[in-house]
Image (spheres, rainbow, N blue to C red):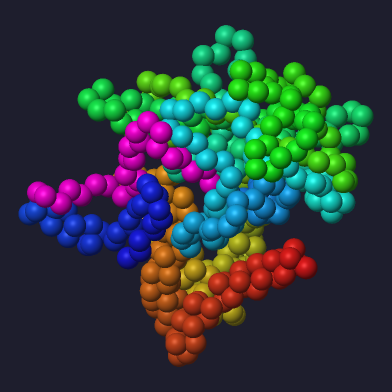
Amino acid sequence: MAIAGGTGCRRGLLLPPLLFAAALLLSAASPARAFYLPGVAPRDFQKDDELQVKVNKLSSTKTQLPYDYYFLDYCKPEAIKNSAENLGEVLRGDRIENSVYNFKMRRDETCKVVCRSKLSPEAAKNFKEKIDDEYRVNMILDNLPVVVPRQTREGSQTPSFEHGYRVGYKLKDDKYYINNHLSFKVLYHEDPNSPDARIVGFHVIPSSIKHEYSAWDDKNPTVQTCNANNKITPGSHTPQDVVPEAYVVFSYDVTFEASEIIWASRWDVYLLSSDSQIHWFSIINSLMIVLFLSGMVAMIMMRTLYKDIANYNQLDNQDEAQEETGWKLVHGDVFRPPVHSGLLCVYVGTGVQFFGMTLVTMMFALLGFLSPANRGGLMTAMVLLWVFMGVLAGYTSSRLYKMFKGTEWKKITLQTAFMFPGIIFALFFFLNALISG
C-alpha cells in the first residue's frame, strides 16, 4: 500500500493484511529472502566510520508552531540537502536536513570549532523571540532524536530525558544567552563477535560560552577558551549574550561511551521523556472534564424524569383521556424521520470512518507495524486508512438515508466524502495562510 522510506536505516513498510500474508508466504517459500516486521533495520558501524548528524525542526510546546532549523542564524553547510520525507513527516512539520556536525565513530573530539556567525539585528531579534517562546532544537543521529538528560530526584534510579535542547535562556538581568556549545555523548553497543557496533543513544548537554580568540582564521579556526585537553562544562565560562552585530562562535564536543543497552531497546528511554508526561496529563484532564459534565447532565435528566413520573402517579385516579405531556411524547417521534436527516446520515458515516480508522490503526500498532523509529509512519497510516475507510462511510450514510425513505442517496454520499474534509482543509489553509503572512 505504501512504502515509507529514506536513507540509512529509515526504512519501513505499511502493508494491508492480504499483502502481509502474501509476504509471509513468499518468505517461507524462499529462505534466502528474510522477511522482518516493518520498522527499521539495524545499522552497524566500524571505527572511524562517518556519522552524519541531521537537524530537524525547531519545536515549542508553548506555541506549537514549528520552524525550520536554519530559520535562525546557525552554521550552515556548503549545500543544504533535505532528506527524503514521507507524507506523515510533512504533516507533522518535520524538516530533516544535513548539518555541519559530523563525527567519526568511536573517535572523541574536544572543542571542535564549527564556524563564526555575525548576528544581524534581525537574527538577534529572531533568537530572542525563540528563547522567549521556549523553542528547542531537534537533531537526529542514526534515526535517534537527540535528548537532554534531566536531573533526577534524590533516591530515583530511573533517568529521564527531554527532547531537543533549548535555543538559549534568559536571566533576571533581562539579557538573552544562546547555547552555542554542544557536548554530545553517543552510546554504542559492541558486537562481541565482530568489530562492529550499533548506536543506542544520542545525548547532548548545551552550554553558553563567549569564546575568546586573537585572530580568526576561517580555514583553521582556533579559540583560546578551550583546547583539545580542556573540555567545557556548563557555567564554567562567561556566557554568550545575544546582541546585534556580535560575533558568535559555535563549537562542540563529542564522546563515545560503550553501553549495555541493546539495539532493540534503544527507544525505551524516550518513553520516560517529559513529552509523554504532558500527554498523559492532558488525557486524564480531558477524561475528568467529560465525566464531570456527563454526571451533571445525568443528574438534570434524572430529576426531570422523576418529576414527570411523580406527576403521572398523581393523575392515576383522574381522567385518563388527559393529553400526554413530558417524556411520553417521545413515542410519537421514534419512527418519524428527523427534519435534517441528510446531515444526520453524513455525521453517522463520518463517525464510522473515524472509528474504522482508529480501530485498524490500533491493530497495526499492536502488531508492531507502526514503529516509532519509522518517523511519520503513524500519520501516514492514519491518512491512508482514512481514505480507505471512506468506502464504509459512504455505504453507511447512504444506507441510513434510504432507511429514512430518502431518494437522493448519491448526493448524501458525496456530502459524506467532502463535507468534513473540506471544512478541515479550509480551516488549516486559513490558519497556515495567516501564520505564513
Q: Residue furthest bottom?
A: 407
- From the top left corner, tell me how far across and down residue 7 is, in percent: 40, 53
180 falls in the magenta region: no
| Occupied quadrant, residue 206 | top right
Name the one closer to the observer, 393 or 48.
48
Left of 1 or right of it: where is 378? right
Q: Main secondary structure of the magenta part?
A: loop
Determine the residue positioned at 7% across, 54% down.
29
Q: Is residue 434 above or below residue 413?
A: above
Left of 103 or right of it: where is 69? right
47 falls in the magenta region: yes
- From the top left corner, tell me how far across and down residue 301 is, in percent: 64, 51
Q: Quadrant of the N terminus?
A: bottom left
- From the top left corner, tell me how far across and down residue 236 is, in percent: 75, 18
Name the one closer to the observer, 141 or 416.
141
Magenta-drawn segment: 31-54
Q: Residue furthest left?
A: 29
Left of 242 or right of it: where is 436? left
How many numbered marks appear?
0
Tell me, yes or no, if residue 40 can be seen here: yes
Q: Residue furthest top?
A: 155
Determine the residue positioned at 15% across, 51% down.
33
Name the one closer to the observer, 160 or 344.
160
Determine the residue positioned at 34% across, 57% down.
14
- From the top left corner, tell me how far across and down residue 260 is, in percent: 37, 20
Tell me, yes or no, if residue 183 can be seen here: no
Determine the residue positioned at 38% across, 74% down.
391
Q: Is residue 268 above or below residue 87?
A: above
Name the one closer to the observer, 391 or 189.
189
Q: Quadrant of the C terminus?
A: bottom right
